[in-house]
């Protein structure tokens, strides 16, 4: 179990990994991302930082096999010298953005004019030559976007909505009426839980804009303070906790001439604006009921704001939101998901175009009648597919992995997390990447660091539910030479998978723990993606019982397959939902789990946000038993195993109160435990030194807790 048993080379690599993991921002730096393809397919725009350890994003263009730098913040006079606006900081936090500099951008329809913001300043660059130039703005700029014709730039400043032309002539089309009002920004629930990160959409005529107006005054107020600096005043934030009021979201049609028309729908019955857009057929809006059982797609009359229901989806549990839907083809056919039984289908014009067993994940784009989307027919992989009348259905990504992409003008960008790590390539013409005789496939350069630890996954299908799991053993371990303590390393909740045929940061971390002497087991249980809607809905009303049961069943099944797993020494670690699962494991199953590290665990489900938590547990006033069943608060007296709680004190997603309340309950019950507070850290800690030491700290805690074996206590009641 001790690092002294490692070989010299393995020990060196293992020792360097935590620092590398931190300085590379989980190996995300240096990877091409945020792709835009020009209408003719000749050019691809993307963002990439300067190296695998350089956090500064730069704007690039790929054309004719050559990459060209379009904008480097270090070369722009005055760029990056001011503070990032608070609205932009929050947008980045919701997106879990790990870099600085150019982190996002937008283009006109021809992909000839690109707009981006640097420390609140508005910048633009033309892709056909020339250097970036600053554009005068009325104040700190957030989310700038060119009009389709490239004549104007829209942006948000101090919660007001502006449009400026390239000469600096600025028009304020919507002024925030008070400190709780904003125009053109996504509210918390939309950005955190609905995959909607934007709050305005240009019309194709470049003369009108569909803009979201958000009023947060009804929303519960919370305060974030910095205990490490008692001189700093607390920050007030609006957080819609389960069962409380949401922000009031309305939509307005604004013209550059100053006209304003409000979009009309039954906002009392459908208070969530899930998606919006404006194509050649007019504005399109998707709204959802508070209980999330009904989703309506609305066509908007741009003259009057009146709406017409084009489609309605219902589900007795909840209607799953699929990114990129609804959309419309050139002929006006609606592109939508449809759930039936064990399959989530893609439909175009009301017709299913994907077969049974192929699970729709997201729609990436529509061009003409061609629909580009991601889907999975194997829970271990996600691929890019396209459907086009006359050509049928084709899978474009070939090698194992989890892919996304962008396409236009006969060119497809495929970005994949593969067994070799992050890989991005440009596929021209039609065909499948990597197949013999296919059109040319050109890789975009990745500058990401190569992990010093190489994952050695052993894929397993476990138990009666055929749970997908992966086992990581130390590279120096020889089968049958001795028992290894076991570390479960799950996420286990909706929205994320940790098991797949891909090398991600999480697989490298699992292997690092294996190199410390653990047999590490990661399992995707019920409620995790890509197993179909029936699998998703098994957690309706109970996010704890099925998830925890699957981890227990998988552990037992894996031990039956691998005799070197020592079930007298079993630990579990996790972050966010994984942290919640880890804490629950030692509370309810101390006879199985002997130690746990719980990072940022949501311990009281009533304190989590409306849209995410009510989706799975219902309204707390109507189904209080679901919240009691799933929350850990009230069950602290069950603890009998070592537990380390870790939490960022600036976390505005899972508030530190979740950990502090559980800790207070444990103390009152006389239950020893450890708490590691992280001053200034949000839900995704950003400090490189903290992130490096966190791995060491968790390892040392677990090693100490499991040293010498653990005698199992009596079984305790619970999930």
Image (spheres, rainbow, N blue to C red):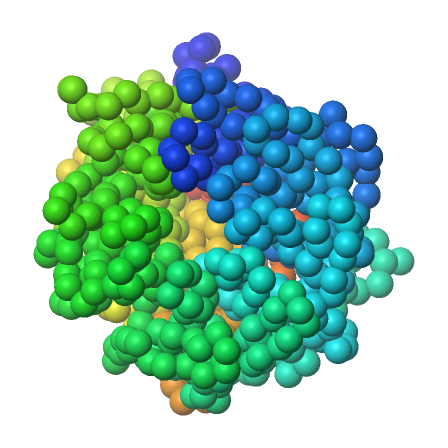
Left or right position of 391 against 502: left
Query: Which residue appears at 68% of the width and 80% of the height?
Result: 217
Query: Which residue appears at 31% of the width and 72% of the height?
Result: 319
| Image-quadrant location for residue 567 | top left
Q: Residue furthest top?
A: 8
Q: Which of 699 and 685 is in front in this view?
A: 685
Q: Residue furthest right?
A: 231
Residue 500 coordinates in the image, percent (x, y): 28, 39
Query: Which residue appears at 41% of the width and 61% of the height?
Result: 279
Residue 3 coordinates in the image, percent (x, y): 46, 22
The answer, for residue 482, to whether it is visible in the render is: yes
| Image-quadrant location for residue 195 | bottom left
Residue 686 coordinates in the image, percent (x, y): 63, 42
Residue 570 coordinates in the image, percent (x, y): 35, 45
Relative to residue 343, is residue 380 depicted above or below?
Answer: above
Q: Which of 315 and 664 is in front in this view?
A: 315
Q: In which quarter of the image is the N terminus?
A: top left
Relative to residue 605, is residue 34 depicted above or below?
Answer: above
The answer, for residue 23, to whether it is visible in the render is: no
Q: Nearer the viewer, residue 167 or 272?
A: 167
| Image-quadrant location for residue 627 | bottom left
Relative to residue 196, is residue 575 depicted above or below?
Answer: above
Query: Which residue appears at 50% of the width and 82% of the height?
Result: 304
């Amino acid at each position: 179990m001790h690092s002294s048993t490692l070989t010299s080379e393995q020990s060196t690599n293992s020792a360097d990994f935590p620092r590398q993991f931190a300085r590379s921002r989980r190996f995300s730096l240096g990877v091409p991302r945020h792709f835009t393809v020009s209408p003719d397919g000749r050019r691809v725009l993307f963002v990439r930082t300067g190296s695998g350890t350089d956090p500064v994003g730069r704007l690039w263009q790929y054309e004719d096999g050559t990459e060209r730098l379009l904008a480097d913040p270090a070369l722009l006079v005055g760029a990056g010298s001011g503070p990032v606006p608070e609205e932009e900081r929050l947008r980045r936090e919701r997106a879990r953005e790990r870099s600085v500099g150019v982190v996002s951008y937008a283009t006109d329809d021809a992909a000839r004019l690109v707009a981006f913001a640097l420390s609140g300043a508005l910048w633009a660059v033309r892709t056909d030559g020339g250097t970036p130039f600053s554009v005068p703005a009325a104040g700190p700029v957030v989310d700038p976007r060119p009009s389709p014709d490239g004549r104007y730039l829209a942006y948000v400043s101090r919660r007001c909505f502006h449009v400026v032309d390239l000469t600096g002539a600025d028009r304020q089309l919507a002024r925030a009426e008070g400190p709780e009002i904003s125009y053109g920004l996504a509210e918390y629930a939309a950005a955190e839980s609905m995959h909607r990160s934007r709050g305005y959409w240009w019309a194709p005529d470049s003369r009108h804009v569909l803009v979201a107006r958000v009023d947060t005054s009804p929303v519960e107020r919370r305060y974030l303070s910095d205990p490490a600096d008692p001189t700093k005043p607390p920050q007030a934030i609006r957080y819609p906790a389960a069962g409380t009021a949401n922000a009031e979201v309305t939509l307005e049609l604004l013209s550059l001439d100053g006209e304003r028309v409000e979009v009309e729908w039954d906002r009392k019955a459908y208070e969530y604006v899930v998606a919006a857009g404006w194509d050649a057929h007019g504005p399109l809006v998707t709204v959802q009921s508070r209980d999330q059982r009904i989703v309506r797609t609305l066509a908007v009359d741009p003259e009057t704001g009146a709406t017409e229901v084009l489609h309605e989806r219902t589900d007795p549990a909840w209607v799953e939101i699929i990114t990129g839907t609804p959309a419309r083809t050139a002929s006006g056919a609606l592109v939508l998901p449809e759930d039936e039984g064990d399959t989530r289908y893609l439909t175009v014009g009301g017709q299913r175009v994907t077969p049974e067993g192929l699970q729709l994940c997201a729609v990436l784009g529509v061009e003409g009648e061609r629909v580009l989307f991601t889907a999975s027919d194997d829970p271990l992989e996600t691929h890019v597919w396209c459907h086009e009348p006359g050509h049928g259905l084709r899978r474009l990504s070939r090698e194992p992995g989890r892919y996304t992409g962008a396409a236009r003008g006969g060119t497809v960008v495929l970005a994949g997390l593969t067994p070799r790590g992050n890989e991005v390539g440009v596929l021209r013409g039609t065909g499948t990447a990597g197949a013999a005789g296919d059109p040319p496939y050109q890789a975009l350069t990745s500058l990401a660091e190569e992990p010093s630890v190489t994952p050695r996954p052993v894929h397993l299908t476990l138990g009666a539910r055929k749970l997908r799991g992966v086992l990581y053993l130390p590279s120096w371990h020889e089968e049958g030479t001795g028992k290894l303590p076991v570390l479960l390393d799950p996420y286990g909740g909706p929205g994320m998978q940790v098991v797949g045929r891909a090398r991600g940061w999480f697989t490298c971390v699992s292997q690092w723990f294996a190199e410390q002497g653990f047999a590490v087991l990661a399992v995707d249980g019920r409620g995790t993606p890509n197993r179909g809607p029936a699998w998703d809905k098994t957690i309706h009303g109970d996010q704890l019982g099925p998830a925890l049961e699957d981890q227990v069943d998988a552990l037992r099944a894996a031990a039956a397959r691998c005799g070197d797993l020592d079930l007298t020494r079993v630990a579990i670690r996790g972050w966010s939902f994984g942290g919640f699962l880890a804490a629950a494991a030692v509370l309810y199953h101390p006879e199985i789990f002997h130690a746990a590290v719980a990072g940022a665990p949501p311990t009281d489900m009533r304190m989590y946000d409306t849209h995410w938590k009510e989706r799975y547990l219902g309204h707390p006033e109507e189904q209080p038993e679901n919240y009691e069943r799933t929350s850990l608060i009230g069950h602290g007296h069950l603890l009998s195993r070592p537990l380390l709680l870790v939490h960022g004190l600036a976390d505005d997603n899972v508030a530190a109160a979740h950990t502090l309340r559980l800790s207070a309950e444990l103390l009152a019950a006389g239950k020893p435990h450890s708490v590691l507070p992280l001053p200034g850290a949000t839900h995704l800690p950003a400090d490189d030194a903290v992130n490096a030491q966190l791995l060491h700290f968790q390892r040392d805690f677990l090693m100490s807790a499991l040293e010498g074996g653990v005698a199992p206590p009596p079984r305790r009641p619970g999930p």
